[in-house]
Structures are given as structure tokens and as C-alpha cells.
Amino acid sequence: MIRQLPLALLLAATMPLAARPVLPRSTPMPATTPLPPYPPSVQAPVVETHFGEQVVDPWRWLEADVRTDSKVEEWVVAQSAFTDAYLKALPERAAFERRLKGLFNYARFGVPREEGGRLFYAYNSGMLNQAQLLVRDAASPKGRVLLDPNAWASDGATALDAWEPSPDGNLLAYTVQDGGSDWRTMKFVAAADGQALADELKWVKFSAIAWVGSEGVLYSRFAEPQPGEAFQARNYDQQVFYHRLGTPQAEDRLVHATPDKPSWGHAASVTGDGRWLVVTSHEGTDPLTAIGLAPIGKGDWQVRPLIPGMTAQWDLIDGIGDTLWFVTSKEAPLKKVVRVDLSGAVPVFTTVVPETDANLEGAAIVGDRLVLAYLRDVKSDVRLFTLDGTPAGTLALPGVGSLAGLSGKPGKAGGHFGFTSFTMPSTVFAFDEDSGKAKVWEKVALRFAPHDFKVEQVFYPSKDGTKIPMFVVRRKDATGPVPTILYGYGGFNVSLPPAFSSARMAWLESGGAYAIANLRGGGEYGDAWHDAGRRAAKQNVFDDCIAAAEWLIANGIAPKGGLAVEGGSNGGLLVGAVVNQRPELFAAAHPAVGVMDMLRFDRFTAGRYWVDDYGHPDREADWKVLRAYSPYHNIREGSDYPAILVTTADTDDRVVPGHSFKYAAALQAARIGDKPHLIRIETRAGHGSGKPVDKIIAEAADVYAFLAHWTGLSPRP
């Protein structure tokens, strides 16, 4: 089981070359026609005193839900019309949109899962708004469509999210995501003929799907929200239920809850042999977990603690009989593998694979091998071990890049993995766990020439001297500084290894460079790297990003006046903060779905989980740190700011759009120069997942046309 960060603020930018030479450009685009006045953003100041400081919040009213508040809706309509008119007039946009449609139009395969002799996998033939779910079996060896989300909504904004086949392969449980919301509805379908079952489970969120035999599933849900609060109220009291197929949800059995600890969240899993129910509990976004167990064979399913406290990371790999394997950070900041013997009166813990000098990011048991996925200097390195920890070689990867999914089962030979790099779309390989050899399972037809690009990894010094890794991707014929985008995230223990992006390739084909900085706060080097970029140390993340920008200009990658900065979610916060602190470094900026009001982030939906990384706004020491960098509160009047395009979505219930609404209103009201400061608001979309391909292309065309215009990049015709 590959570890998933339960509630991390993750929105990775996922963005291909022409034969003409790239000429260096050292001056920004000339100014365009002055903007007309922005649509009005009425100020209705709320004044509060926190720890002796008076704080004014002029646009508090923009926090209201656009679905139910007519004034916010009117503001959104006006801002959207203003921004749309500007973006459609950009001369670079049409070329980007044409090339994006070509780059997205290739067949994409997900990593398959095998159960009961059937192979289940996601598939997009190219321009489908949503990936389909296909199944291969004796009756359909080439694959047939089991689920097609493209028929679920006329606008393509209803997506297939998680899915899990039953152990016998006869049924499939899956969750439906509508309009980008974090809420899910769970449904079921027969694998043989696609017949839908009547069962439907509501108010599912941040949930795993765990089959108990083929009769029912364990899942996590919250209580039904009060009317009007579904998309803004904070999430507490998550519970694990068991649903037996053929019964109404109201009769579902409560399996695990912690009413005395309402901030705890819970996810259930069942070992591959069906022997043990394992409940993993967390409180925030830190990878600190408690573990509870119950033997499936006993009818009471009373979950008893195995790891009672949240002092380290414990991630179940799998179990065989009375033995469980875990990845843990206990006394191992880069993590190790521990085996737990449950056959006696007291569990016995044994280290199987000790901590190494690389960060252990995920693991699985395939056949009779432990398959361990390490991140070594931000590149995947997959090692094989016997179940007792004896080294058994490596898994042959096709190059420098990163693992993008892994599947396989204990006791069954062979598995599959996905692999990607900056110049290689995610490709599925079948592998043999004994030899470590791999071969392409389904070939991917490329829409660009990967050998026309070069990828370099550099290690540059941050403000305090810490060496920060950064990937720089550009055309091989780039002979001097070219318009460059710097991307960063820097938070929540999230790593940014090499990955392919069709949208990014449109930028690279046109001659631009793209740099991805692996800032502190991420998970590239384990717990210590994460700790060095959060809470009181959050300024390190901004210093790392600023130092990356300075390095790119000083070393001739980006011209002065030709550098843009981009980031999403926690990365949107990053962009807002570094633009406030060093506006002169950047020609343009793109903060996407960002956390912009650091004094109130914990008051909405999943925001209360983020105190692990940001701190608590109601505690004085934390509040002072947050106040010092909060993007909304630190816009520098009188400074010359870059062109800024804020992006968000009206149905984002992870980072509620009020963050971006307030920040954009503040930018437009401030005296920060004549460049445009706009907000693009997507409809029927959320924090990023589930967004249909047509919306992805339209947004990428807008964003990259904007950044190209202000950095001086001419898109490929």
C-alpha cells in the first residue's frame, strides 16, 4: 500500500518543442493599453484586536458562500467578466490553446489493479473530459468500459474518484466527485456486466474503501451538515462505518469513532488476506498516526490500540496471517520497515529494513518481496527485499524520474507501476519482483520530441546557506536567458519529484524554461526537511523561493524582467508571500487556490487540520508568525508589483475561495503599480481534482498566455 497524505494541501502544477532557435530576451514585454477601472469591491471593515494589535479586515463579507450570498455572487460575476475580457484579448492565448489541445490528445493509462482474474484500470483516449474505468478479463481481453463518468454530467464536471474492486473481482465500489467538491458519494457496480447496484452512501469525505469479503465495505464519513453549511463548516467527528450491500445506509454499523477526540480522523483498511481490520487515525496533516486493530473473524470488531499515541508515522504496508508490516518514522526520520507479530499475547515489533540515507516514501508486498520506493535527491529509487529484510536487488526504472503508482499482491507473482519524468508522460510497466525486470505494459504515443529538452538538477544556497535542490527544464537549443516560470510548494511534507505535464510542455516548446524548487517544508529529505519549513520556520520556505529566483537570474536561466512565479494551494500562499517580500524579482505571478488569510484559515472546512504546518491563529506566538507573512495582510503599498493572475474556483471546499476573493480585492485596492491584478474564477470546479480536460486546457491557456505576455515569451504558432 503506497502511503497517501490524508489531507495535504496538494495541487501540483501539471503542465511539451519546435525546431526554431530560442533567442535570449532581456527585456519584458512593452506595456499594453492601460486597464479600465476594476469592478468595485465594497469595503465593509471588520476591526478586531488580537494580542494587542488592531487588525482591519475590509473584505470579510467575501468569505460568504457564493452559492448562497447574492452580493458575493454579483462580485464574482463582475470580476469574471472583467478578467475574461482581458485574457481573451491577449495575443498569446490562441496559440497556447491550439497547442494544448494537441499535447493533451494522447492515450493515458492508469496503474491497473488485479482481483479475481480481472484487471481494472483508468483510461483516457485523449480528449475525454474524465478518465473512464476499464476492465480486462477472459471475455474482454482488450478491455471494456465499466464506468464512463463523461455521461454523468453535461458539463463534464462530475468525476470518478476512488475505486476498489472486491477480493473476488465481481464487484467494484467507487466514489463520485461532483463539481470539484471534497464530498463524495459511494456507489457500486457489477464487474461482469456493468449493472449498477442500488446502494448509495452519502457524506463520504477523506475516506478509504476497504472490502470485507465481497459482502460489504468499510468507509469514513462525517455527519450530514446543517443546511447551508456543507461547503464551509469545519469537519469534526469523522467515523468509520461498515455497509453491508443490499441494506440502507441508515442501518450501517458504526465500527470506530472517538467522540472524546473530535479532531481525530480515521481511515479503515483490511489486510490482503482479509484477516485484520486496521484503523489509521490522524489529527492534522502531520504524518503522525495512531493504529487500531480488530480481527475480522471475530464478530465484535472491537478496535483495540496497537499504536495508541500519535508520536510517529505508521503506515500499513500489508499483512499475512498474524504478521503485519509497517513503514514508520519511529526513531527513523527517513523511515524504516517494521514487522509486527500478533500471534502471542503481546505484539512483538521487529525492524526489518532499517533507515537508510534516502527518504522512504512508500511500500508494497508483491509476491514474496517487499518493494520499497525511496526518494534519493528527489528522484525515485526502488529497492527489493525479502519479507525478513534481506536485500534482493532493485526494480529497473526507465530513467531519472519518479514512481507514479504501484500495485501488486502478497503471494501473487508480478505487479505494475507507473513512471514519469519531465519529458515522459506517466507510463505503466509490468514487473517481475524476483528479477526486478520491467517492461512497458501499454505504450504511450508522444505528441512532442522528448530529446529536444534538457533537464538539470542544481543545488543552490538559500539565505542561511542551506543547499536547496532545483530542477531546471528547457530546450537544448536555449543559448541564453529565456522567459522562465519558477514553481514551488514547500509544505505539508509533500515532495515535488520529476513529473510530466502537458500544459507545462506547451510553455517549454515555445522556448521558455521551467524551474521546480524543492523548498524546505516538503518531504524530499524526510522529517527534518519538513520541520525546517513550517510553523515558526515558515520564513525559510519563502527565503528558499526568493533565493531560487535570484539564482535563476544570476546564472543566466531567466532574464531580469522575465521571471514568473507560480504555485497552488500552499504554493499559492508561497507566491503571495514572496511577491509581497520581493515584488521586484518577478514580472508576473500566478497564485492558484491559495491560503491567503493566515489569521482565519482554520475556520473553514478542512482548514483546521493545517495548524500542524502553520500553527494556531488563536495562540500568540503562532499568530505573530502568521501575521508577519499572511499574503492578505502584507501587501506593500507604494511598491511596484508584478502582473498577478489569481485563480480559484467557486466550489473549492478545501481552500475556500474567500481566501482568493479577499486577496484579489486587496490587490486591486492597493497602490502597487499599473500592471494588472486579476482574478480568474472557475465555475463548477474545486481545489483541482476531478476538473474536466476542457476546463484544464482553458485555464492553462489563460494562465500561460498571461505569464508569457508579461515575461516576453512568444508561444509556438
Image: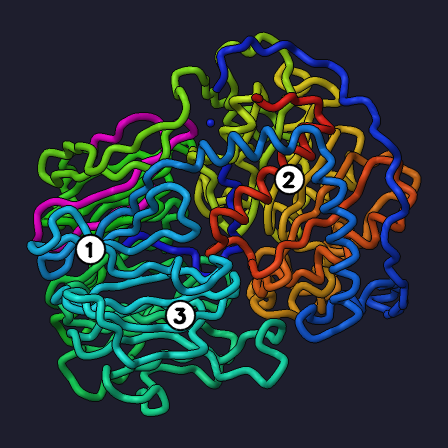
Where residue 47 appears, as percent x and y from the top left, is 89, 69
Is residue 344 highlighted in magenta?
no
Residue at 49 percent of width and 49 percent of height: 493
Separation of residues labelled 3 and 1 (CA atoms): 33 Å
Which is nearer the N-term, disc 2 or disc 3? 3
Q: Provide the residue designation for mark 3.
A: 281
Residue at 36 percent of width and 36 percent of height: 106
| Crowding at mark 1 (Cα within 10 Å: few <14, some 14-19, many 20+) | many
Q: Between residue 319 and residue 11, name the one nearer to us.
A: 11
Q: Between residue 172 and residue 622, name the one nearer to us.
A: 172
Are the residues flagged by discs 3 and 1 in contact, CB closer than 8 Å?
A: no
Please, what secondary structure does the residue beneath circle 3 have?
A: strand
Where residue 439 appears, as percent x and y from the top left, is 17, 32
Q: Between residue 191 and residue 486, name the one nearer to us.
A: 191
Image quadrant assignment for residue 482: top right
- Provide the residue span drawn in magenta: 396-423
Residue at 15 percent of width and 34 percent of height: 436
* Left or right of 10 in this view: 572: right
Which is nearer the N-term, disc 1 or disc 2? 1
* Left or right of 535 in this view: 505: left
Is residue 409 highlighted in magenta?
yes
Q: Can residue 357 be seen in this view?
A: no
- Tell us which disc is closer to us: 3 or 1: 1
Above or below 258: residue 340: above
Quarter of the rendering occupied by the N terminus: bottom left
Q: Provide the residue designation for mark 2.
A: 702
Q: Provide the residue designation for mark 1.
A: 135
Residue at 57 percent of width and 61 percent of height: 684
